[in-house]
Amino acid sequence: MISDNKNKLSDRKKLILKAIVDAHIANGDPVGSKLLTRNELISCSSATIRNEMAELESMGYLEQPHTSAGRIPSEAGYRFYVDWLLDRYNLTRAEIDELKNSLQKKQSELDSILQSALAVAAKLTNYTAISVRPKIEKITVSRYELMRLDDYSSMLIMLVGGVVKTKYLRSNTVISSEATHALAMILNMYAVGLTASDFTMPLIMEMEQHMGNYDFLVSPVVKAICMTLSEFDGGDLKIEGVNKLLSYPEFYNLERLREMLMLFEKKDDLLEIFSGKPTEPEKVQVYIGKENLVKVMDNSTLIFKAITNDGKTVGAIGVIGPTRMDYKRVIATIDNVANGVSAALESNNSKKDI
């Protein structure tokens, strides 16, 4: 149990473990006792520090890559650090302003907002950023709108899984603005929340009865809706800053880098990870090393947070980087980015309410 492990470590061991993780994150080198004696918070001799480091290694929190080298954190050490030792990181005013500017644009689609958030997450963390719309088992339309373009054409607008989809409609007969308005009302009355298989002939006939002289509009519109639902896979993954992996020695190995690039290209494994519902969606999720289900990520850390809209999880945003990661800064950044995207979606909802 993590809580038991927390109680097993003395305050001095916690200080030493935290100092080692902080130093290793900063420079990537093994950390020796000599360096730790310069830490003002650790008021003990070099010999005492070496003994404590040896005990932390025997407990599984540290590793010694070479016999004469210092120690580096193990995955268990990083996990303890994230769970119990992490200081709160406050974004700078410049970082907050950049985040707000990227999200306060007049955007209506989840994809557009996520794209802006993705760029700022990669820039602020200097890691590869990932945004996800998870797979949805039941694809339905939650809202319909019809925009009349001219006497013979209109645009069908559908909100599907938090994403706006459109279909261009063309008629051989003049369609009045009253007809398009009536059709939008009928669709929102009968077709919201239906899957493609739910559009039965009796339902279509009932919709046609309500349309009166414009009953011929119903069939092509239903066809367009079903086509959209069948095309919509309910999951999407976008990546920003893949080249940032090259900034870290952990990815200098060409074979490992190739495997990571294949992971990004295939996307299915990552979509599967994000599609699982977090036990605590309001919190930032941290998966360190072998905690990741995907084998190629066993030397990487995945940090992400769910994005909500109207109380429902509609996506997630996060970063992938080495286990030697600036956890407090990255967690704070992803927390703020995800909250900003959720707030932007809620704001757009209030603007669209009619």
Image (cartoon, rainbow, N blue to C red):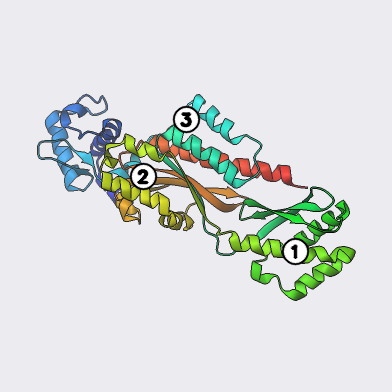
The residue where tag 3 is placed is 91
CA separation in Å, label 2 and label 1? 55 Å
- Please state the horizontal and vertical placement of residue 327, each as a whole percent of the image: 37, 38
For discs 2 and 3, the disc positioned in front in the rendered view: 3
Determine whether the residue tagged by mark 3 lies in a helix, strand or loop: loop
- The amino acid beneath tag 2 is Asp
Q: Is residue 43 above or below residue 67?
A: above
Q: Is the residue marked by circle 2 packed among few (<14), some (14-19), or many (20+) residues within 10 Å? A: few
Q: Is the residue marked by circle 1 packed among few (<14), some (14-19), or many (20+) residues within 10 Å? A: few
- The amino acid beneath tag 3 is Leu
Visible in this render: residue 220? yes
Q: At 14% across and 33% down in the image, what residue appears?
A: 48
Which quarter of the figure is the N terminus placed in? bottom left
The residue where tag 1 is placed is 220
Determine whether the residue tagged by mark 1 lies in a helix, strand or loop: helix
Q: Is residue 156 left or right of residue 210?
A: left
Q: At 64% across and 60% down in the image, what residue appears?
A: 228
The residue where tag 2 is placed is 83
The disc, 1 or 3, on the residue closer to the chain's N-terminal end is 3
